[in-house]
Image (tube, rainbow, N blue to C red):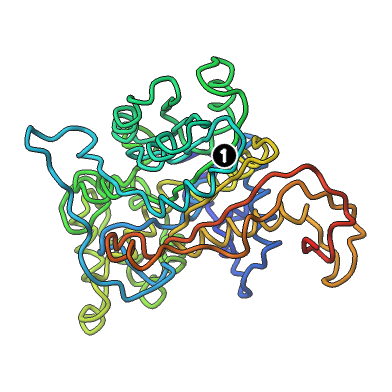
């Protein structure tokens, strides 16, 4: 599945979900530093550009129905109900079927308002919520929307149609961002320069809420979990081929530390498993009865881990962020909305490396390594949604928004020990 090697040869690096290329699991007990994460991201970019396809890289989970909340999110203990989808009187149209409220939309528009005229790439366009607001409020910008889900592409195309040739929607994974942008630029459909890139990470609400997509343990459906339901290996392929040790590693990395081995053993014994209902029951039976009485459904973190692996998002994010930063013109900005600490750590590491030019000099000392700075953080840390937005849309609660801007190159004199002076 998924490229080179066989399931028995998969080895996950616990620091970032990297493939090590060996036959043995390599456990790294210390937490990764920003430099570690940035170097891992660069390695992912090099692997992808060399044509090496990763098998089961870890992905950070998105905000979704309450069933997928777990310790892997920024905050635990969420409660309440997901927002209802409003159905039209005259029948269900695509845009309503794929309804998804954009998170921190005003903040996104405000952050992109100062960028020079040009193209904003919405690398995860979904239903077109952010893109529609950008086009409506910022007349100096055009939008290229990307998504690999055909339903999302149809919804975004409909939502952005009123903006005419200021919008273009393409079906593509966001690690194909560079090629798609250059193709659209060559066709002269939109502005020639990239002024902004937006990543709203995670699986969308419609993908999670529709039982037939196979993301949910609450309904019995084919075990799929692909964000693009037309291509690539399914969750059933993973569940029925990956060995016990690697399954346990995936589960442990996504919060199911106590019973990861028991669950993996039970899954292997129950093969073949074809539906979400079958998998959920196998997991439930593998967890002791006392543990099942607290913490929600025992399958939620297992489903989360499998979804993460199926959709190969960490390596994709590393590639896409590198391409996005390279495409920006001076004054252009890249924004990332992350909903999980793993996504946010990777984004933070890549942004930190860009904003310091990769300087690794000792803190407090002038830079002597020749690092050249071409980017600056728009603000330190990450912004979070306001209380009113969280009350209106509970799925916004774990969101973290980071932003970086491309600047004219500055020499190493601007750095003091890896920090922008």
Q: Which percent across, then down, holds residue 43?
A: 67, 48
Q: Which percent across, then down, holds residue 30?
A: 63, 74
Give the side of residue 161 with respect to residue 200, left or right: left
**Image height of 111 relative to 269, above or below:** above
Q: For residue 268, which quarter of the picture?
A: bottom left
Q: Which percent across, then down, holds residue 72?
A: 42, 68
- Could you say which is closer to the camera, residue 48 or residue 166? 166
- Residue assigned mark 1: 196
Q: Residue furthest bottom?
A: 290
**Image height of 27 relative to 318, above or below:** below
- Could you say which is closer to the camera, residue 46 or residue 166? 166
Give the side of residue 42 with respect to residue 3, left or right: right
Total numbered labels: 1
Q: Quadrant of the C terminus?
A: bottom right
Q: Which percent across, then down, holds residue 244?
A: 41, 62
Q: Residue furthest top?
A: 187
Which residue is depicted at the point 18% across and 49% down? 85
Give the side of residue 382 with respect to residue 168, left or right: right
Q: Residue furthest right?
A: 368
Which residue is depicted at the point 30% across and 72% down? 78
Q: Residues within 10 Å of mark 1 (few under 14, many from 20)?
A: many
**Image height of 27 relative to 307, above or below:** below
Which residue is depicted at the point 84% across and 60% down? 415
């Amino acid at each position: 599945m998924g490229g080179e090697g066989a399931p028995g040869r998969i080895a996950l690096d616990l620091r970032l979900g990297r493939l090590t290329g060996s036959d043995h699991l390599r456990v790294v007990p210390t937490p990764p530093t920003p430099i570690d994460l940035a170097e891992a991201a660069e390695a992912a970019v090099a692997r992808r550009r060399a044509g090496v396809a990763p098998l089961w890289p870890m992905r950070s989970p998105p905000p979704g129905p309450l069933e997928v909340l777990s310790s892997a999110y920024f905050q635990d203990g969420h409660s309440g109900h997901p927002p209802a989808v409003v159905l039209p009187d005259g029948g269900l149209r695509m845009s309503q079927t794929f309804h998804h409220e954009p998170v921190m939309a005003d903040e996104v528009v405000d952050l992109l308002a100062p960028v020079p005229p040009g193209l904003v790439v919405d690398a995860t366009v979904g239903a077109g919520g952010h893109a529609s607001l950008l086009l409506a409020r910022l007349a100096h910008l055009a939008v290229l929307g990307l998504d690999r889900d055909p339903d999302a592409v149809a919804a975004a195309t409909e939502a952005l149609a009123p903006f005419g040739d200021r919008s273009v929607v393409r079906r593509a994974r966001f690690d194909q961002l560079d090629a798609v942008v250059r193709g659209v630029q060559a066709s002269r459909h939109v502005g020639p320069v990239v002024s902004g890139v937006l990543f709203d990470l995670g699986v969308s609400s419609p993908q999670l809420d529709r039982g037939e997509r196979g993301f949910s343990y609450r309904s019995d459906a084919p075990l799929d979990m692909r964000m693009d339901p037309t291509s690539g290996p399914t969750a059933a392929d993973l569940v029925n081929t990956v060995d016990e040790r690697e399954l346990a590693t995936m589960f442990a990395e996504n919060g199911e530390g106590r019973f990861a081995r028991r669950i993996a053993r039970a899954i292997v014994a129950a093969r073949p498993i074809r539906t979400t209902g079958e998998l959920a029951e196998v997991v439930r039976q593998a967890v002791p009865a006392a543990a099942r009485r607290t913490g929600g459904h025992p399958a939620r973190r297992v489903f989360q881990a499998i979804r993460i692996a199926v959709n190969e998002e960490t390596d994709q994010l590393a590639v896409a962020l590198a391409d996005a930063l390279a495409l920006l013109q001076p004054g252009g900005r890249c924004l990332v909305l992350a909903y999980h600490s793993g996504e946010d750590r990777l984004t933070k590491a890549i942004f930190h490396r860009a904003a310091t030019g990769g300087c690794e000099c000792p803190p407090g000392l002038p830079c002597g390594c020749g690092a050249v700075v071409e980017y600056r953080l728009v603000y330190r840390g990450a912004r979070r949604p306001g209380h009113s937005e969280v009350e209106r849309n509970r799925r916004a609660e774990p969101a973290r928004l980071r932003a970086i801007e491309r600047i004219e190159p500055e020499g190493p004199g601007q750095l003091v020990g890896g920090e922008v002076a």
